[in-house]
Amino acid sequence: MKKVLSLLLVGLFVLGVVGLAKAEKVEITYWQYFYQTKKDTINELIKEFEQENPDITVNHVTFPYENYNTKVASSIPAGVGPNVINLYYGWLPTYIDAGYLQPLSKEYFDPVTIEQEFFPLVQAAKIDDSYYALPTAVRSLALIWNKDRFQEVGLDPEAPPKTLEQMLEYVQLLTETDRAGNVTKPGMTVEVRGQMHHWIREVLVRQFGGVPYAEDNRSVTYNDQGGYSAFEFFTDLTIKHKVGKVGFMTDDVTAFKSGRVGMYIDGSFRIGTLNKLKNLNYGIAELPSHQGIKSNFASFWANGITSHTKGKELAASIKFLQFLTSDKAMELWLQKVGELPAKPAVALQEKNANHPQYGPFIKGLEYAHATYFVDEKAQRQVWIDAYDLVRLKEISVKDAVDQAAETEQKVLDKYYQDK
C-alpha cells in the first residue's frame, strides 16, 4: 500500500512539473515600421501563430519610418527592444557591422535549402556563408496608370505603353498646364525620393546600355554613356518635356491617389493601399522596355533575430521567423499587402502569375536586379543630389552623373576598406 502511495505521489509530482513546464510562457517582441496594411497583416499572422503556439506571446511594436533606425540604434546595443526585427535589405551591412543581428542558425535556416526555395535575390541577405535575415515577401516595380485619365485624352484605357518611346508620347498627352505654364495634371510623377532612383539605377541605366556596378559590387560603373543617356532621359521629363513636377501634392503616391496623375512607377507593396480607393480606376503593367531591353528592380524587407536574443526567447523567435517565412504567411501577405511571395513555388502559381495586379510585378522578377546596398540612404541621396544639380543649378547631365559616381564610390570604398 505504501509503495502504491509513493508511486502515486511521484506520479503526481511529475505531472505537476510537466504541467508547470507546459504552462510556462515566453514573450518576444517584434518591430516593424508603421505602414497600416503591414501592421494589420502582421497582427493577423501573430494571432494565428499564437493559436498554434499557445506558450508564445508576440508583442508587436511599430514606429514611424523616419524614426525607425534611431530607435534601433538606441535600443538593441542596450540589450532591449525587439527579438525579431523587420528591416530593409539595404540596411543589412549597417546592422551587421553595428552588431544588431545574429546570423540565422543553420540548423533551422539551412542556406542550401533557402537557395533552393527562395528567389535568388534573397542572397543579398547572405554575408559570407550565413543568412542574417529572410523575407516573407519581395518587391518589384511596375507601371501604374489611371484609366480615366487615359480615356479623357483619347488613349485606350486598357492599353498602357510598352516602350519608353510610347510612354513619353503618352505622358505628354496626359499633362495639363495652366495659362502660366504650371503643371496642374502631371503626365507622370518624378519623385527621385520615391521609387524613381531605383528606376534610374537598375532600369534606365541598363536599358540605355550601361551597368550600374561592377560584378563584385565594389565599383560604380554608371558614369559612362549608358548612365549619361539614362539620366538625360529622366531629367528631360521635367526640364525639357515638362510632364511632371517635383513635390506635386507633396509626393508621388498622394498625387496618383488624387486622380490627377496619368502614370507613375511604384512597388508591389502599394497594391493594398490603392485597392482601398474605390473611386480610383487604375491598371498595372510591366515597366516599359527600351531597345528591346527589359529590366526591373527587386528588393525586400526581411526579418532577422537581434543579437541580444538568447535562451527561450531565441527558441521562440526562431519559431516565429519560420512561421513568417512559411507558404501560408506569404500567401496572406500577397492578398493583404500586395507584396510578392519570396518563394517561386508560391508566387508562380497560375492564380498569382496571371493576376491582373500581381502578375506584372511577378513577371518583372524574372529580369529584376537587387542592388547590393552598403549604405542605402547615402546611395539613394547621390541620385537625389544629381537630379537637383541638373534641375536647379543647370549643371550638365554628364557632370551630375560623374559627381554622383565619385560620391558613391567613396561610400563603397569606406565600407570595403577593411573587408
Image (tube, rainbow, N blue to C red):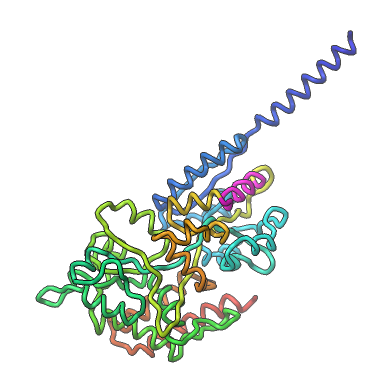
Hey, which residue is sitting farthest top in the picture? 1
- Residue 164, placed above or below residue 277: below
Indicate the position of residue 74 as horizontal and vertical percent values: 51, 55
Residue 189: x and y in percent read 29, 70
| Horizontal side of residue 23 vs 238, given as left or right | right
Compared to residue 14, the image places residue 28 above or below, namely: below
The residue lying toward the viewer, choosing from 286 and 182, is 286
What secondary structure do most residues of the magenta stretch adopt?
helix
Q: Which residues are magenta?
A: 314-327
Determine if the magenta segment contains residue 39.
no
Task: State the image quarter where residue 415 is shown.
Answer: bottom right
- Residue 70 appears in view: no
- Residue 290 in sight here: yes
> Measured from the top left, where is residue 59 in percent x and y?
52, 42
Check the picture and name the quadrant holding the C terminus: bottom right
Q: Residue at x 71, y 57 (%)?
A: 106
